[in-house]
Image (cartoon, rainbow, N blue to C red):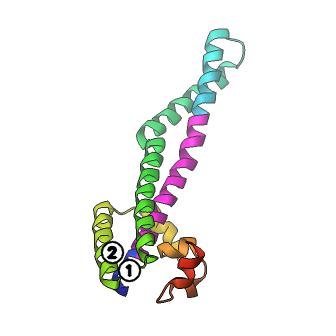
Amino acid sequence: MSSIKDKLDNDLGFYYWKYYIAGAFWSNIATPINFCITVLSALISAQANTDSILSDNVYKDLSIALLLLSTINTFLRPHIQMNENVQMKSKYDAIGTEFERVFFSDNTNDEKKEAYGLIAEKLDQLRINDLIHIICRQTCLSSKNQWLSLIYNDEEHVNSPDNTIVAEEHA
C-alpha cells in the first residue's frame, strides 16, 4: 500500500505545483497587458476626441503599441490561460484533500488501498503536460514533490507509519 500512497503523494504534489506555477505565470502576464491596453485605449480615445493631449508622433506610437498588445492578448489569451490553470489547480487541490482524508483516517490498510485506487483513477483523468511547469520544477521546486510536503514541514511525522502524531495535531 505504501507504493500507491507514495505515488499519489508525488503525483498530487507535482500536478498541484504545475498548475499553481502556470496560473501565477499567466496572471503575471495577463494583468499588465490588460492594464496597458486599458490605459492606452483611454489615451488614444482622449486624443481622438480633443486633438490636443498628445503630439501626432506619440499618438501614432501609442496606437501601434495598442495594436500590438491587443494582438498579443488575443493570440495568447493570458486571462483565459490563467483561469484554466487555476481551475485545474483547484481540481488537484480537491483530490489532494481527499487523499489527505484517507491518509489520516483510521481505516484499515485494505480500505485505504481501495480509497487510494479511487483517488488514482480521478488523478489519471486530469493528467496533461506543460513546458512552463517542467522548467520551474527543475529550477525552483525540486524539493516540493509530495502533496503532504506542501502543508506539513515535519518529514518525520508525515512519514511515520501510524500517522498518529500528525493526525492528532491536525484533527
Q: Main secondary structure of the magenta part?
A: helix
Which residue, given by chain and number where applicable, does mark 1 sit on?
5
Please say if the residues under marks 2 and 1 sit with CB atoms less than 8 Å apart. yes
Name the amino acid type tagged 1. Answer: Lys
Res 121 quadrant in image: bottom left
Q: In the visual, does 161 lie left or right of 127?
A: right
Answer whether residue 34 is magenta in the image.
Answer: yes
Residue 141 seen in the current view: no
Vertical relation: 33 (above or below) 118: above
| Dot 2 or dot 1, earlier in sequence | 1
Q: Residue at x 47, y 52 (%)?
A: 86
Instruction: Residue at the far top: name it.
Output: 50
Instruction: Residue at the far right: name it.
Output: 53
**Magenta-drawn segment:** 9-35
Q: Position of residue 34 (x, y in %)?
A: 56, 36
Q: In the visual, does 105 lie left or right of 157?
A: left
- Residues 133 and 145: in front is 145
Q: Which mark is residue 116?
A: 2
Res 38 quadrant in image: top right
Q: Residue at x 46, y 35 (%)?
A: 71
